[in-house]
């Protein structure tokens, strides 16, 4: 690396360290600035292995400055960034817009209405994150209502009911009530009977194809004007399970010439031959369609505000016909765009993930390659980090992109202070050590001297990562041990004068003893990585989130007799 490039790296590192420190009102972190540093300066990437050692002293220098000194320095290096950070601080903390007409309601009541056909992927987190936050802002109420009235196409997964409730708790919320639509089928039958009596629904035995042709032509079905008594009788046949799938449906009578064909006499109930997996609902064969069931439940539970996808605008229009028949006032509706999340090769789809698990291409819902809440939880990402990132997306009708880096930044702020530091060497290369102290003593945490130091034995030889091995004759600093020179395939100890690092830019690297170490398997989004950790790592507890220096944060998953397993959290 030439001198000009090194100076450029140091200048950019100082800027990003100052931005990080001022933004979070805390010390800057090498791991936290690596992403933006490399993203803005792609020419640095070929030297990615060297950069942490170069910027470490820069970050340390920034952290030694007072808050005011950091701001003054940032004003010199990047005044536009200081202005932007100050503007963010002055902005309203409530990034969510006010709910429409909230003042017209005694209590704000909202719902999350998942289909329990599997555990949640990351996109599902948006709804409980936002409505849970609205509940807190308005001192309101929300229900988790499982819309499980499709026993066939989106067949409920019996484990998903509890898994989804666990995910909501993980995100930081607790519903005021939990309902299962499959427990409420008689209620939907009763409302259908009322609708029939009003002349607002009729039974139809047209084939799907035949009705579609009539509907698209704006022509009524021949069953549309049958008398109420006949419709009531035929609907009871449906309820009693005397008909099979496809034989008959109950339609809501709307406007057969409506400009939107999707709203013309839509289906409210259909026959399903497949039994529901819940024993309590296994005998039902006549099932409500989602728009009917959901609309009835929203009214009966007093929901005041509904949030749903922009692609579901027709649902509100269908339900409005039902509400008009009953003389009900429709809730306020907020439509939002879809959220897309980067980094994953696996599609964010419950059915896709379920199939990949069945095919053995994923190990389970908590596989680190799966874009699921179970996966990120096992990786050591806190629910609060996800909730905060989802809230920042707001409720725009446009599709939005969520970068995992924003979740990582939130989580880093939550775990960094408690995360003790350890060394892990991947694909280590063994080198003899000459004249070195017997034990290295790096700190457990750079910001907490009170936690003490680790004890890493040397035992005559060390493992260092292949990219860290200095050229013959070059020097390197083994963190917590001292300065060494690579001489004749060994590392010769030169002392512990830090000026070599601070003034001459000698790289700082991590290491472990070649024979006194802990084998580790690190599970990542890109597959498993093997390595060796320092002995003190074995004392960590399962579920601890720690930092492997120069690698990133990990969650300790298990300690076995042969090796330990960790899940990679993020840089």
Image (cartoon, rainbow, N blue to C red):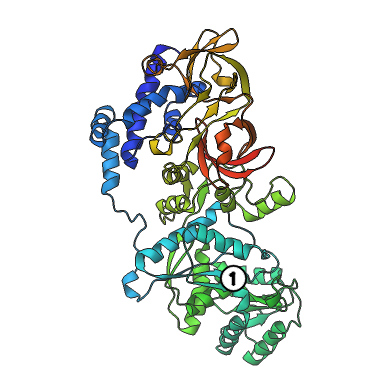
**In the displayed structure image, the side of residue 395 where residue 267 appears, left or right:** right
Can residue 448 be seen by looking at this rendering?
Answer: no
Q: Where is residue 446 in the image (x, y as percent from the top left)?
A: 41, 33
Q: In which quarter of the image is residue 556?
A: top right
**In the displayed structure image, the side of residue 5 where residue 256 appears, left or right:** right
Label 1, on which residue? 290
Q: Position of residue 75 (x, y in %)?
A: 24, 31
Can residue 307 be seen by looking at this rendering?
Answer: yes
Q: In which quarter of the image is residue 329?
A: bottom left
**In the displayed structure image, the side of residue 374 where residue 310 appears, left or right:** left
> For the residue labelled by badge 1, is the local secondary structure a helix, a strand or a loop?
helix
Q: Position of residue 503 (x, y in %)?
A: 36, 15
Decide: few, some or many residues near mark 1? Use Cα within 10 Å; few <14, some 14-19, many ≥20.
Answer: some
* Residue that lies at the very extreme toward the bottom in this rendered image: 229
Q: In this view, does 50 lie above or below 359?
A: above
- Residue in the foreground of this view, choosing between 167 and 62: 62
Q: Is residue 227 above or below residue 569?
A: below
* Residue that lies at the very extreme toward the front in this rendered image: 438
Q: Where is residue 478 in the image (x, y as percent from the top left)?
A: 49, 21
In this rendering, the count of numbered labels is: 1
- Residue in the foreground of this view, choosing between 494 and 354: 494
Q: Residue at x 43, y 35 (%)?
A: 452
Q: Which residue is drawn at 63% across and 75% down?
A: 182
- Residue in the foreground of this view, choosing between 128 and 263: 128
Q: Is residue 561 above or below residue 206?
A: above
**In the displayed structure image, the side of residue 538 where residue 236 appears, left or right:** right
């Amino acid at each position: 690396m030439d001198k000009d490039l090194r100076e450029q790296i140091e200048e950019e590192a100082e800027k990003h360290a100052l931005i990080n420190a001022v933004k979070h009102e805390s010390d800057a972190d090498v791991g936290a600035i690596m992403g933006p540093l490399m993203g803005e300066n792609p020419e640095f990437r070929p030297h990615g292995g060297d950069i942490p050692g170069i910027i470490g002293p820069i970050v340390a220098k920034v952290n030694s400055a007072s808050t005011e000194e950091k701001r003054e320095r940032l004003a010199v290096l990047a005044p536009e960034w200081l202005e932007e950070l100050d503007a963010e601080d002055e902005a309203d903390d409530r990034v969510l817009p006010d709910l429409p007409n909230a003042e017209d309601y005694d209590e704000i009541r909202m719902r999350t209405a998942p289909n329990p056909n599997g555990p949640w992927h990351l996109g599902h987190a948006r709804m409980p994150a936002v409505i849970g936050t609205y509940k807190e802002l308005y001192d309101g109420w929300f229900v988790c209502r499982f819309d499980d009235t499709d026993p066939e196409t989106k067949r409920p997964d019996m484990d998903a009911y509890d898994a989804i409730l666990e995910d909501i708790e993980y995100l930081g919320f607790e519903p005021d009530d939990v309902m299962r639509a499959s427990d409420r089928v008689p209620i939907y039958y009763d409302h259908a009977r009322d609708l029939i009596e009003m002349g607002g629904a009729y039974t139809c035995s047209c084939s799907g194809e035949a009705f579609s042709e009539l509907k698209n032509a704006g022509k009524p079905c021949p069953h549309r004007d049958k008398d109420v008594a006949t419709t009531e009788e035929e609907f009871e046949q449906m309820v009693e399970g005397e008909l099979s799938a496809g034989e008959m449906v109950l339609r809501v009578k709307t406007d057969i010439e409506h400009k939107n064909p999707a709203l013309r006499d839509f289906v409210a109930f259909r026959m399903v031959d497949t039994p529901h997996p819940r024993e309590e609902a296994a005998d039902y064969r006549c099932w409500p369609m989602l728009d009917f069931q959901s609309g009835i439940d929203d009214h009966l539970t007093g929901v005041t505000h509904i949030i749903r996808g922009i692609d579901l605008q027709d649902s509100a229009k269908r339900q409005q016909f039902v509400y008009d028949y009953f003389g009900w006032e429709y809730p306020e509706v907020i439509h939002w765009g879809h959220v897309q999340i980067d980094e994953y090769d696996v599609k964010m789809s419950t059915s896709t993930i379920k199939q990949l698990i069945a095919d053995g291409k994923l190990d389970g819902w908590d596989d680190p390659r799966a874009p699921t809440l179970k996966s990120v939880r096992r990786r050591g990402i806190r629910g609060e980090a996800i909730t905060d990132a989802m809230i920042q997306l707001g409720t725009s009708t446009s599709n939005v992109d969520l970068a995992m880096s924003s979740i990582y930044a939130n989580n880093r702020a939550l775990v960094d202070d408690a995360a003790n530091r350890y060394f892990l060497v991947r694909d280590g290369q063994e080198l003899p050590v000459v004249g070195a102290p017997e034990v290295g003593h790096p700190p457990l945490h750079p910001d907490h001297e009170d936690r003490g130091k680790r004890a890493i034995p040397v035992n005559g030889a060390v493992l260092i990562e292949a990219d860290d091995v200095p050229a013959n004759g070059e020097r390197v600093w083994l963190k917590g041990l001292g300065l060494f020179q690579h001489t004749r395939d060994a590392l010769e100890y030169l002392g512990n004068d830090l000026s070599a690092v601070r003034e001459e830019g000698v790289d700082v690297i991590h290491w472990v003893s070649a024979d006194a170490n802990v084998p580790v398997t690190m599970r990542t989004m890109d597959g498993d990585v093997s390595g060796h950790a320092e002995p003190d790592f074995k004392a960590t507890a399962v579920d601890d989130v720690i930092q492997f220096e120069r690698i990133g944060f990990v969650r300790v998953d298990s300690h076995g007799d042969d090796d330990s397993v960790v899940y990679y959290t993020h840089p």
